[in-house]
Amino acid sequence: MTRISDMDIDLLLTLDALLQDRNITHAAARLGISQPALSARLARLRTLFGEPLFIPSPHGRGVLPTPRAEALKPQVASVLRGISAMFAPTTFEAQTSRRTFVIALHENPALMLGTALLNQVGTDAPGIRLRFALPEMAELPQQLENGDVDIYIGVSAGAHDGWVRRKLLDDAFATAQRKGHPRGTGPLDLESYCALSHLVVSSVGDPFTGFVDQTLAGLGHQRHVAMSTQSYAVAPALVAGTDLVCTLPERMLRQFASTLDLFAPPLPLQPITINMYWHPKNSQDPANAWLREQLLQAAGRQV
């Protein structure tokens, strides 16, 4: 019984060339091989199919395909077209795509990037939908691998070493208060800063202690934290309606500049770096690459 593995691409190309040229010399030239090499392939085809596929022309000019060979002609052409199609580059037409992209990210980068990204995609690719999902860090490696999540956006803490990374933005911290705050709008010194009532955004550990408190402790100071929330999105509204102040990434706070005044905090705070991460299997995928370009543009970085 003939096995598929006995047929190789060289035999298919030989069969196709002989069906087209009906001449061993011409077919060998088409394939870039010698006539003896082509004759050897022809012998392999005879053995594979259990009968000759070509016979010498009785007029001494070339070869003639047998009925079996003639019947194979459309099948051979179809198989070769299929193989050629395998090597065609994949494309992604964003303007006509109906795809849904899933981006895993926390509220902070969502507030920083969401508006610009959605406006941009809505203009350039109106059929595409975006889904922002809170990352489940324990599940994220599998989700990126199997395609349930296209890109993760966040800080380096918790990111997998095997993911591909590119920086989206660096962001400094700012201190925000409501417009018309009783303390006025003058610059803050450290003593005044610590004396104010603060709102902290915290989702892990002590809800009333964050990196700002750790920095203050190193300077020998302590602030008064009056309220804690797990939500970045809630914090600006709470500050805008109270006398609380908060210290959060500046780019996020700028989204609420109509209701908040921003100031440089009177202590040294390291900027945060927000990266995007994707699975290496998607590095050459045109759709994933398009999404990465949109994120870079939304972040104001060069593509």
Image (tube, grey):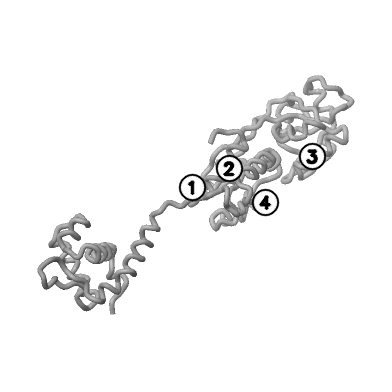
- Upstream in the sequence, badge 2 or badge 3? 3
Q: Are marks 4 and 2 in contact (CB under 8 Å)?
A: no
**What residue is shown with label 1?**
283
Instruction: Give x and y (percent) for residue 177.
Output: 82, 30
Instruction: Give x and y (percent) for residue 144.
Output: 56, 53
Give the CA separation, mark 3 to mark 4. 20 Å
Disc number placed over residue 149 in the picture, else none: none
Mark 4 neighbour density, 10 Å: few (under 14) some (14–19) many (20 or more)? some
106 lies above or below 13? above
Mark 3 neighbour density, 10 Å: few (under 14) some (14–19) many (20 or more)? many
**What residue is shown with label 2?**
276
The amino acid beneath tag 4 is Ala
The amino acid beneath tag 2 is Met
Q: Report the front residue among 209 and 262.
A: 262
Residue 57, image quadrant: bottom left
**What residue is shown with label 3?**
235
Give the CA separation, mark 2 to mark 1. 12 Å
